Image (tube, rainbow, N blue to C red):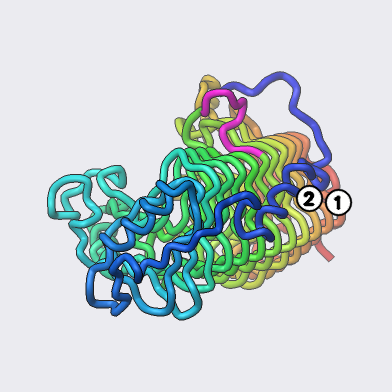
Amino acid sequence: MKPSSKPTTLKLEHAFPVALCLLIALATSGMAADAPGKVFDVRKFGATGDGKTLDTAAIQKALDECGDAGGGVVEFTPGTYLSKPITLRTRTTVQIDEGAKLQATGEQAAFLKSGTNWLEAKSSGDFVAFINGRNLTDVTITGPGTIDGAGENYWGPAETARQKVPGYTLPRPKLVVLTGCKNLIVQNVTLQNSPSFHLGPVECEGVVISNVTIKAPPHSANTDAIDPTACKNVLITKCHIDVGDDDIAIKSGRAVAGRAFASEDITVTDCVFLHGHGMSIGSETAGGVRNVVVRNCTFENTENGIRIKSQRGRGGRVENVSFSDLTMKNVVPAITFTCYYMNNSAKDAVQQPPPKTDTAQPVAEKTPAYRNIRVSNLTATCQGSAGIILGLPESPIMDVVLENVHITAPGAGFTVKNAKGIVFKNVQITNQEGPPVVVENAEVTGLEQTKK
C-alpha cells in the first residue's frame, strides 16, 4: 500500500470522541439496552459444573436456545464447567458468575478441524478456538468469573519446537476468536492460560474490552493477551495484563472492503502491563492502521514498552498514532518503532541485529510506512538500551514528535536512523554507553537537551 502524497492530520488527543462516547456507554451498560433479558442457566440444560464431566452439549444447547429465542443471558453459576469448543450466537450475553470457571478440556484433538494429532497441524487455521463466533451482533462476555484455556498442555511442546527450529511458532488453538461481529463487549472477566492468543476480535466494529484480567506465565510463548485484527472503533480500558507475548497487538494483515485502513479508531487507556511484550502495532500492517490513541498506562518488567513493528513484505501505512502519559519500569526498551521487525525483537536470541548498511529497494504495496506519531509525557527505566526509531532507506519513518520524554538506561541511548521530521521537545536520555542519541541518515531537531 503506497502512501498518499499528503498525510491525514488531526489532533490525536481529541480523536473520534463520538465513537468513544458510544463505546463507553456500551461498556457501562453491560449489553445493548434493548437486548432481551431472559436467562438460560446452563445447569438447567444438564451442565454439572463439577470440573470432571464434559458439559459441552449442555452449554451449546443453552447458547443455541438463547440465540433461537432472540437473545438473552447464558449464565454460569459457581462451579467449573469442563468443555470442548463452543459457538456463540447473536444478542447473547455469556455471564460467568463469581466462583464460576469455564474450563477448556485437555483433550487436544477436540480443537482440531480434522485429524487427531495436534502436533501435525500446519497452521493455526487447522484449529478452532475454545470460544467462537462469526458475523454476530450484540455479544457480551462478562464476569467476574474465569475462562481458562488449559494452555499448560501446549506450552512445553511449543518451546521444544522453538528450540529445535529457532523462531518457529508451533500452531495451537486460541482462547476466544470472534470474527465479523458488531457491538462486542468483553468486561469484568478473567481470561487465562490460553494455548496461544487469548482474545482476538477479527474484522469487528464497535468493540469494548473493559476491566478484563488476562494472565499466563511469562515463559508461555505466543500467549498474546488482546489482538484486535482489522477492527474499527475499539476501546480497551482498565485491563490488567500479565502474559508471555504481546500484551496488546493491533494487527492489520490485509485490506478490508470499504475501509481505507483495516484497523482504525482504536483507543487503549488506563491499562497495566506486567510481563509480556508491551503495547504493539503490527507486525502485520499490510491493511493499514490509523487513529490509535494509547494513554495513561503503566508497564513493568515488559519486553518492550511501546512498539510499532513491521518489515518488508508485511507492511502498510501506520499513521496518526498518539502515546501519552505512560510510566515504565524495567522495560526492554522503552520505545521501538522499526521497519526491520525480524531484526529487532528484544531478548530473542534467534533475532539478528539490523543491517549496518542496507540498499534502498523499490517501494511496493507492502512496504512499511509510518508517519504522524506523537509520544508525550513518558517516563521509563530500561534494562538495556533506551529505544530506537528505525525506518527503511526507501521508506523513512516520518513526522514523529517526542515531548516530555525521560528515559534512563544502563546501556546504549536512543537511535534514530532512516527518518525525517523527528522532533525532540524536552527529551532526556540518561544512559551509560555511548552518546544519548545516535543519528544516522535522519533529520532530528531538539537534540540539545537529551542529557542532563
Q: Which mark is residue 402?
A: 2
Q: Crowding near pointer 1: few (<14 within 10 Å), some, many (20+)?
A: some
Residue projecting furthest to the left:
116
Q: What range of the chain is rendered magenta?
A: 256-264
For the residues labelled 2 and 1, the Cα–Cα distance comes to 6 Å
Q: Main secondary structure of the magenta part?
A: loop
Residue 201: x and y, percent? Answer: 49, 47
Residue underneath mark 1? 425
Query: Residue 298 sits in which quadrant?
Result: bottom right
Q: Is residue 210 above or below residue 115?
A: below
The reply, left or right, for residue 220 in relation to residue 309 is left
Residue 28: x and y, percent? Answer: 69, 60
Q: Amino acid at mark 1?
A: Lys
Residue 273: x and y, percent? Answer: 59, 67
Q: Which mark is residue 58?
A: none
Q: Name the quarter where the C terminus is drawn.
A: bottom right
Residue displayed at 38% across by 55% down: 63
Query: Residue 264 sits in which quadrant?
Result: top right
Q: Amino acid at mark 2?
A: Leu
159 in magenta: no
Tag 1 or tag 2, which sits nearer the N-term?
Answer: 2
Residue displayed at 75% across by 65% down: 379
